[in-house]
């Protein structure tokens, strides 16, 4: 049973309850749940594979520095090596050629790392067709039911694909024709980038684009349109089933790598749970 939360304290110099105190009380009392949307990062984390003529990202590696031994008797620590776009990660605008000269990951304003989310669920469609594409009409249908996409928020696409994240082969789902993973159509990607009020797109797959997006016009339209519009990407998210269609708040914490095109991130969501003590 949750410990009863104390009443929110008043803000200094005011009789009005503090918003931050109310948030802490909600977290302590269970009225607000923290859902971790981040995949664990290890040597088995799936990584994007490009055709062999291109440079490849580094699989995550740990190098032990010391572990309570003669290299360091009282401490354990490691070096790590990996690519910026490994595991659950954040895409900055400068990641794509269309965003050349735009913000790097260290330049993303901190206030944009905390934002509301709309969650669109296509798990049934993807279970039938791994190449399923989200169209603008799907987003309009969602808006007709739940309301407008959040201004300054995230559009999160739930597909159930994170259930495959235990292994590289199942996650990339590739054959002689290339990867088969869901995503947005080129028209939908352009609409999200240029017409929607959201700041970015979050997905469960290895990247924001569909597996077959190399053959779209333009190729990789989510990267091309979103990065070119100064928007962001979140990939390899997990536990989206724990989020409602509206109302969740996403906290995305990428490493602030100076001049970096992206970074692994710890991504959390705050979800209000009805019927819990406040």
Image (tube, helix red, strand yellow):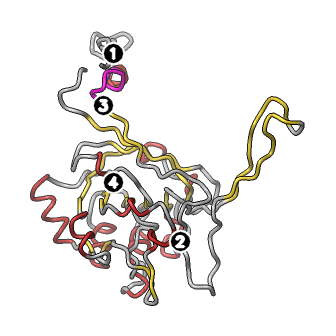
Numbered-mark total = 4
Look at the picture and state if 62 lies above or below 16: below
Residue under numbered circle 1: 3
Label 1's element? loop
- Residue 10 position, x and y percent, is 32, 12
- In the image shown, does 35 or 144 lie closer to the viewer? 35
Look at the picture and state if 99 lies above or below 218: above
Q: Which residues are magenta?
A: 25-31
Residue under numbered circle 4: 154
- In the image shown, does 251 or 179 lie closer to the viewer? 179
Residue under numbered circle 2: 48
Tell me if 37 is positioned left or right of 257 in this view: left
| Predominant SS along the magenta part | helix
Tell me if 68 is positioned left or right of 184 in this view: right
- In the image shown, does 274 or 108 lie closer to the viewer? 274
- Residue 90 position, x and y percent, is 49, 57
Nearer to us: label 4 or label 2: 2
Look at the picture and state if 7 lies above or below 212: above
User: What is the C-alpha distance between the residues marked 1 and 2?
Assistant: 44 Å
User: What is the C-alpha distance between the residues marked 1 and 4?
Assistant: 32 Å
User: What is the C-alpha distance between the residues marked 3 and 1?
Assistant: 13 Å
Q: Earlier in the sequence, mark 3 or mark 1?
A: 1
Residue under numbered circle 3: 32
Q: Quadrant of the C terminus?
A: top left
Circles 4 and 2: CB distance less than 8 Å? no
Tell me if 18 is positioned left or right of 110 in this view: left
């Amino acid at each position: 049973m949750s410990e009863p939360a104390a009443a929110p304290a008043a803000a200094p110099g005011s009789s009005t309850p503090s918003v931050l105190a109310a948030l802490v009380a909600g977290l302590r009392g269970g009225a607000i749940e923290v859902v971790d949307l981040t995949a664990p990062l290890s040597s088995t984390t799936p990584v994007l594979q490009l055709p062999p003529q291109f440079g490849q990202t580094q699989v995550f590696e740990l190098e032990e520095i010391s572990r309570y031994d003669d290299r360091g008797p009282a401490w354990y620590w490691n070096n790590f090596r990996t690519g910026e776009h490994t595991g659950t990660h954040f895409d900055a605008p400068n990641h794509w050629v269309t965003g050349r000269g735009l913000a790097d990951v260290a330049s993303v304003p901190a206030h944009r790392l905390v934002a509301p989310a709309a969650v669109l669920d296509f798990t049934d469609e993807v279970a039938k067709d791994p190449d399923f594409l989200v169209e603008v009409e799907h987003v309009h249908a969602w808006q007709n039911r739940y309301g407008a996409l959040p201004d300054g928020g995230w559009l999160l696409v739930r597909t159930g694909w994170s259930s495959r994240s235990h292994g590289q082969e199942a996650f990339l789902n590739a054959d002689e024709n290339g990867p088969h993973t869901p995503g947005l159509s080129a028209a939908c990607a352009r609409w999200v980038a240029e017409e929607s009020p959201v700041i970015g797109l979050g997905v469960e797959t290895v990247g924001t684009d569909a597996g077959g997006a190399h053959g779209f016009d333009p190729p990789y339209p989510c990267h091309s349109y979103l990065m070119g519009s100064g928007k962001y990407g979140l990939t390899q998210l997990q536990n989206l089933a724990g989020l409602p269609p509206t109302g969740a708040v996403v906290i995305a914490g990428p490493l602030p790598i100076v001049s970096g095109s992206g970074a692994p991130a710890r991504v959390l969501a705050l979800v209000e749970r009805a019927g819990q003590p406040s």
